[in-house]
Amino acid sequence: MITAGLRSRVEAWISDDPDPGDRAELRGLLADGGTEAAAELADRFGGRLEFGTAGLRGVVAAGPNRMNRAVVRAATAALAGWLAAREPGAADAGVVIGCDARHGSSRFADEAARVLTGAGVRVHLLPRPCPTPLLAFSIRQLSAAAGVMITASHNPAADNGYKLYLADGAQIIPPADAEIEAAIRALGPLREVPTGPLDGPLVTRHGDEIAGAYLAALTAEAGHPTEPAGPASGAPLRVVYTAMHGVAGRLMLEAIARAGFAPPHVVAAQADPDPDFPTVAFPNPEEPGALDLALAEARRLGADLVLASDPDGDRLAVAVPDPRAGGGWRRLTGDQLGALLGGYLLDRTAAQPGPGSRLVVTTIVSSTMLSKIAAAAGARYAETLTGFKWIVRGGQDRPGGRFLLGYEEALGYAVGDVVRDKDGIGAALAVLGLAARERRAGRSLLDAYDALETAHGVHLTRQLTLRTGSPGDVMTALRAAPPAALAGQPVTAAEDLAAGDRGLPPSDVIIYRLAGARVVVRPSGTEPKLKVYFEVAGPAGGDLAGARRAAAARLDRLRAAVGELLAAR
């Protein structure tokens, strides 16, 4: 049954909602009045999407706890006011708006543009749809004050989102998110928010010139073509690529061609943008089964490499042939590829001026192997909190650094400073360059990783996700009674980042260190879960395979012990 209070909130929202379709949707639920309709309305009006450091993200539907035009209008009106108060000249510099091909993306992008022009802010509209890295690149290219990307990245098909970047081309960080959230809460009725036309003098609709500049910058960063060619070098790399029903395909293929590599074989069933993602259960290349079609094509063609974009093109998955793996193919982890790219980029730049200024960055939950690779190369290394909003700013306290690579274990990579966010297209060019180099030397990517672990030690990482109704209570319990040992091994140090540490901002993270191992515990920022990140590291000795087996056994014991510890809290 719909209570009188709930009905009143819904009717008030309907009177203020700018979208006639959403108003009709809510009226239909009110008219239904049944148990399911009441539960649905209670969920939609039990809270509201909050503007956090990732902006907004949620299911596309009507109501304050969903993604819709009303929510976008409120967020954009708050953004316009925030820019006017803090960024002199922001109205003239303007805001760049891009969107992917998800349900509602074009409508939400148009809504944001109308609100900004209604506030007197210039708007730059990118061609639709476009990948997220292009939006991040375009902000600095156009000297804009901010950028808005309508995307839910690799979320389920029902979702969409609103991602905000500032003038430096990087995602917002605190306190900007909290200030914009406060401005949203302070807004008056949405019907009083002024809106402007999409064809007025404040709107510039860009063509392919931004993408052309982006591709030129990527290929310059990638260097000269490195594809093997001619009888002495063997055949070109045989690559299978999937866009996973997302928006990166066109620019990915053009980038590969401009960099001098042979065209990849494209998985046709996933080549075109489709907001329903019909061939995958979950459009995230990290998820089991997401690469099945690409791997089937790779086996059929006898390919050397599989590359996969996520739906908005900011992440990259890579798989390689491995007869020891199920199905004959192995998907590289984010940590493995991060180490491979770090080693490759540091090798490639070793003879350039100022080798000590080179900077590689990763996060506190990623593998520590990159730190050892950087030390051996005489380069700088930094660790940040999770998220590219921190990674691309990882060298801010180290003036003069030259950013070579930033990566996170969740398949995100930024190669160079072309895009100040993760960029799966730029990362793909670096992977192809590395694979081609190894091919010329008669080696594979797995051989290259073996060489890294032989030189720097075995580094095995894994995650554990535990659902809990009160992640905060578990973290409080861990702080009150920290474990003295895990899996029979003493905890040698415990770092609590709640107050900040090692130059890192305060964060709800606890790090336990053991001899040759590390455990990081943090609550999820979006779901009632605890996330745990494990690493076991040790010298390879003369038996790399044996060292890996020993590390895997130790990690299994550690994972089981931590699972029991958290379940008991």
Image (tube, helix red, strand yellow):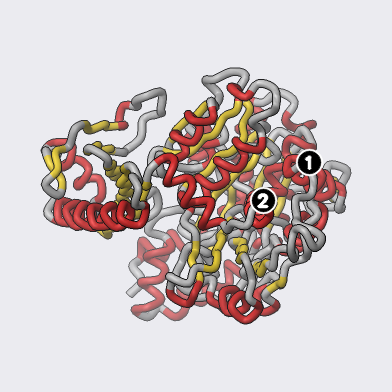
Give whichever of 138, 114 is nearer the camera. 138
Image: 468 above or below 212: below
Left or right of 217: which side holds 285?
Answer: left
- Give the number of the mark in front: 1 or 2: 2
Q: Going 12% across and 41% down the picture, which residue do you hit?
A: 485
Query: Residue flagged by tag 2: what amino acid is it?
Result: Arg
Left or right of 130: which side holds 423?
Answer: left
Q: Going 64% across and 46% down the picture, which residue do you hit?
A: 192
Q: Quadrant of the N terminus?
A: bottom left
**Residue at which label 2 appears:** 437
**Residue at which label 1 appears:** 220
Q: Kindly state the secondary structure of the residue where label 1 is placed.
A: helix
Image: 9 above or below 32: above
Give whichever of 409, 145 is nearer the camera. 409
Q: Position of residue 428 (x, y in %)?
A: 66, 54
Q: Is residue 522 visible?
A: no
First reached walking from the N terminus: tag 1 or tag 2: 1
Query: Residue flagged by tag 1: what amino acid is it?
Result: Ala
**Badge 1 density bin: few <14, some 14–19, many ≥20, Cα 10 Å:** few
Label drawn at residue 116? none
Give whichever of 62, 409 is nearer the camera. 409
Q: Quadrant of residue 365?
A: top left
Q: Kindly state the secondary structure of the residue where label 2 is placed.
A: helix
State the separation of the CA atoms marked 1 and 2. Answer: 18 Å
